[in-house]
Image (tube, grey):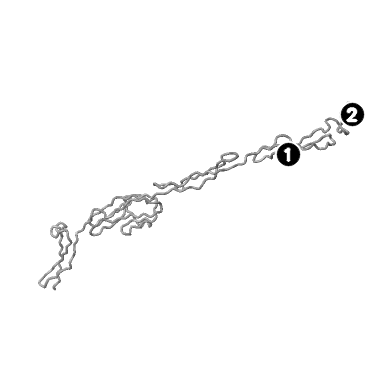
């Protein structure tokens, strides 16, 4: 029984041998097999010299962006055969788009961060590689800054004077949020002033006495006055003294019978009765 013989042939050729023989240009080769039955040729295999140039066609550039702004870092890797694959590093650590949906590296080797966060600040490097070499771009520093924002106004202060025309103030601070990473300070005034007026206290004053009343059976008369000239206002003091005054209406001369143990004698002079008590 006869079988079909199959031979496997392999040749190892170094790059230097190829360049010495063919130069740096692409070339092709094929395998030729022959026997007493005839000749057979393989398909052509094209061989290209792999390389990766040193300089990037476009390196990423550092940027300063506001928080929640978009960051786009461009990278065009060096020319090479086969074409270089690109990955991104942040602070020399690989960036994984699977772990952070806010980052996209699929668009023409560019790095896109849709909404910048403070944690996105750092040094970004474009890394290009193929079967020949790896090339690193210069690092691009990204700074995410925060512009300052005003807090709410405080309540107005008390008027600067107890009474009359004065000034009151209120204030606010640039802390909502505070500027960060070179962000702009708040625009506008941190202190507001406003004129104010408070009525001054008015101390009370007595009006004139009223006329004396008619003399009573007790030989007394009365007159009164009111604290209305002026009335006390805005915390002013009340009037000092009595609002009602009582007086003997005869000047010690009675024109009617005395009471309460007195009697009229000697032309109307009121004298006290003398009562003798025997023990």
Residue at 65 percent of width and 38 percent of height? 202
| Residue sitting nearer the eye, 143 or 86 | 143
Residue at 59 percent of width and 42 percent of height? 197
35 left or right, relative to 185:
left
- Label 2, secondary structure: give it: loop
| Residue sitting nearer the eye, 96 or 250 | 250
In terms of image quadrants, where is residue 268? top right
Which residue does the numbered mark 1 point to in the structure image? Answer: 226
Residue 94, given in percent of the width and then of the height, sits at 32, 53
Residue 198, given in percent of the width and then of the height, sits at 60, 41
Residue at 66 percent of width and 40 percent of height? 233
Which residue does the numbered mark 2 point to in the structure image? Answer: 267
229 left or right, relative to 180:
right
| Residue sitting nearer the eye, 145 or 276 | 145
Sequence-first tag of 1 and 2: 1
Residue at 60 percent of width and 40 percent of height? 164
In the rendered image, the vertical position of residue 230 relative to residue 91, given as above or below: above
Image quadrant in which the C terminus is located: top right
In terms of image quadrants, where is residue 156? top right
- Residue found farthest to the top: 279
Residue 64, given in percent of the width and then of the height, sits at 36, 50
Residue 103, given in percent of the width and then of the height, sits at 36, 56
* Mark-to-mark CA distance, 1 and 2: 39 Å
Q: Report the number of numbered marks.
A: 2
| Residue sitting nearer the eye, 109 or 266 | 266
Q: Tag 2: Cα neighbours inside 10 Å, few (<14), some, or many (≥20)?
A: few
- Label 1, secondary structure: give it: loop
In the rendered image, the vertical position of residue 268 relative to residue 153, given as above or below: above
């Amino acid at each position: 029984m006869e079988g079909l013989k199959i031979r496997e042939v392999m040749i190892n050729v170094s790059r230097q041998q190829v360049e010495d023989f063919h130069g740096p240009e692409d070339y092709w080769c094929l395998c030729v097999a022959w026997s007493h039955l005839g000749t057979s040729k393989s398909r052509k295999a094209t061989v290209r010299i792999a390389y990766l140039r040193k300089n990037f066609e476009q390196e990423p550039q550092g940027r300063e962006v506001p928080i929640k702004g978009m960051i786009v870092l461009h990278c065009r890797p060096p020319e090479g055969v086969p074409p270089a694959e690109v990955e991104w590093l942040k602070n020399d650590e690989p960036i994984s788009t699977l772990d952070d949906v806010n980052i996209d590296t699929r668009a023409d080797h560019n790095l896109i961060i849709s909404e910048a966060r403070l944690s996105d600040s750092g040094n970004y490097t474009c890394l290009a590689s193929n079967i020949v070499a790896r090339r690193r771009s210069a690092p691009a520093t990204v700074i995410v800054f925060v512009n300052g924002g005003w807090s709410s106004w405080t309540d107005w202060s008390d008027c600067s004077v107890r009474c009359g025309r004065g000034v009151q103030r209120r204030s606010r601070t640039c802390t909502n949020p505070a500027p960060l990473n070179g962000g702009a300070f708040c625009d506008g005034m941190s202190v507001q002033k406003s004129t104010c007026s408070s009525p001054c206290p008015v101390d009370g004053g007595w009006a004139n006495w009223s006329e004396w009343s008619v003399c009573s059976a007790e030989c007394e008369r009365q007159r009164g006055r009111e604290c209305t000239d002026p009335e006390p206002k805005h915390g002013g003091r009340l009037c000092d003294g009595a609002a009602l005054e009582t007086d003997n209406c005869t000047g010690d001369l009675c024109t009617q019978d005395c009471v309460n143990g007195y009697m009229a004698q000697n032309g109307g002079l009121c004298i006290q009765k003398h009562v003798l008590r025997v023990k």
